[in-house]
Each structure stands twice: as structure tokens, then as C-alpha cells.
Image (cartoon, helix red, strand yellow):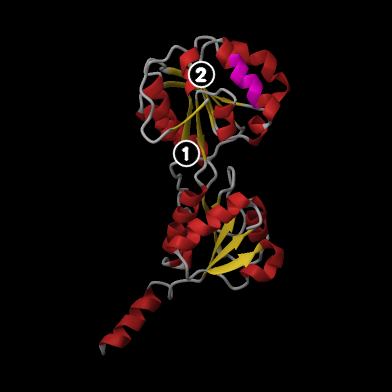
Amino acid sequence: MNRSAGLALAVLATGGARGEVVMLAQREVPQYAQVAAGFQKVNPQARVADVADGALAVRDSDVIVAIGSKAFELARAQPGSAAIVAAAVLTPQPGGSHPITAVPMESRAGDALDALRALAPNARRVLVLHPPGDSPMLSEARAAAKARGLSAEFRALGDLSGLEGSLHELLQGQQALWLLPDARLARPEVAKFLVATCLDRKLPLIGFLAGMAQVGALVAVAADFDAIGREAAKLASDLAARAPAARSGVPFRFVAGHVLVNGRTAQQLGLSGETPAGAEMVR
């Protein structure tokens, strides 16, 4: 057997040639445009499609990188078994006929806790509020807290109608409050209430949006959309190189976010810890 024939047989044995990758985006949204630009830096050869094109946009693709929730839902609704990489989607859920993995909107959990440890090294008991149900984000947060030796109490938030009355009780004995990404907590009136409550009790608050730090949270770790796009391109290439049967069950990848620290809040809390390297100071 000559060398070229041997290579051809090897390709057949591993399930075929590299699959086609299509990036499905809604690029009129500035944040999604940043993700798309980051993706194309790493994989300029991928086919580019827009959600406005509908089902035709992803026809016959093997791996779909769906940027944003609208693109993600469109990709999931398509027939076939193309693998999907959800990029910059908040808490994407697997299920259905497509293998699903993600580089989600949520940033790497350890960044938030490392910022807390740098600014408030004595804060060891942390209340963690998160959306109901299990998720890769929650598993990531639990592992990060355990690795840093924190006593973290995880509480799922159901109906927010009772939050104002229950938060004071939940914070009893705690030394910090950490908010995992939850669209309901991003509402301005809710975020301001959480900030005011923590300032009143002299507790550090870790949020997940830049605006939370700007209104008084000690720390916020916001999504880095360029980094999400670059990592999504790498993850898509990894999937495309696999045989179709090996594209299921691939773990989510969380990337570093932008760390913001409110200097005025640090002063109000009497904190003397060091500002984390690379963090942006706001007031």
C-alpha cells in the first residue's frame, strides 16, 4: 500500500475529514460583533452567516458557533445533529438532537474570588446567590470556592418577590456576597438594592456586570467578548477535528473576564488589601 492510500484509510477510520464550521451571529448587536471579531481572528476560514438568513444559514454545517441567545435558539431548532458551540449565551442548556457545548457569557469563577481574596483577605464566609437548577456555571463556582478554602453557602433564587425581606436574614454571619450571573439580578432596581444592602452591612459584594461596580459593588467581573470569541473558535476547531460520535459531552470553557474594582467602596468598607493585577478602578 502506498503512503497516500494509507493516509486515506486513516482518515476514514477516524470518522472523516475535518467538519465544516459556520459562525452564526447577530452582528448588529455590538457585544456580539465583538465576539464575532474575536472568533475571526482565530478562525478566518469559517463560513459566516447571520441569524436573519434563518435555517439556510446553517444548512449542511458540522459545527455551528452560535453567538448570542437568538442564534443559539435558531441553531437548536434546526434538523440534523450538527454540534453547537454557544458563545456569549447566559447559562446555555444542553439537550435535544444536537451536541452542545459553550463558551458562555459567564466569566471564569476563580477571577471573582481571587479579586475578593486580594481586596478582603479576611472574608472567608461567602453567601452565593444563583439561579435555580444545576449548571456548568454553578459547578465551576463550587469548585473555585473549594479550591480557595472558602466557606461558601450556595442559595438558589426562586421568586425574587421575597428577596428584599429575606436578604438580611441570609446575610447573617456572612462576610461577603457573591452574585452568579442571573438576568433577573441585572435589573437596575435589583442591583441597586443589593449594593445598598451590602454597603449598609459593610460587606463586600461581587457582581457580574460592569454597571454593578459602577453603582457600588466592590468587585464585578464582566464578560470579555473578544476572549469569548477567540476561545469559541478554538473549541469549534477541536469539535470539527473529531469524529461526529465524539462531539458530545465536551465540557464548557470559561474565560477570564474584565475585573472592575470600586475604589470608593473599598474605602467605605475600610479595606486595605491590594488591588488585583490588571483590574480596572472605578468610582
Which residues lie in the magenta part?
191-197
Where is 39 relative to 90, above or below?
Answer: below
Q: Mark 1 belongs to which amino acid?
A: His
Name the spot of residue 222 as percent of width and height, x first.
52, 38
Q: Which residue does the image show at 57% across and 28% down from the upper left?
A: 214
Q: Earlier in the sequence, mark 2 or mark 1?
A: 1
Q: Which residue does the image show at 66% across and 56% down from the upper left?
A: 28
Q: Is residue 186 left or right of residue 22?
A: right
The secondary element bearing badge 2 is classed as helix
Q: Answer whether residue 253 is visible to the viewer in this image.
A: yes
Name the spot of residue 220 as percent of width and height, x first.
51, 31
Q: If the image is split into quadrants, where does the N terminus sit?
A: bottom left
Q: Tag count in the figure?
A: 2
Between residue 260 and residue 137, name the one nearer to us.
260
Q: CB of mark 2 within 8 Å of CB of mark 1?
A: no
Alpha carbon of mark 2 to alpha carbon of mark 1: how far? Answer: 18 Å
The secondary element bearing badge 1 is classed as strand
Magenta stretch: includes residue 195: yes
Mark 2 — residue?
A: 265
Q: Answer whether residue 159 is visible to the viewer in this image.
A: no
Main SS class of the magenta portion in the image: helix
Q: Mark 2 belongs to which amino acid?
A: Thr
Mark 1 — residue?
A: 258
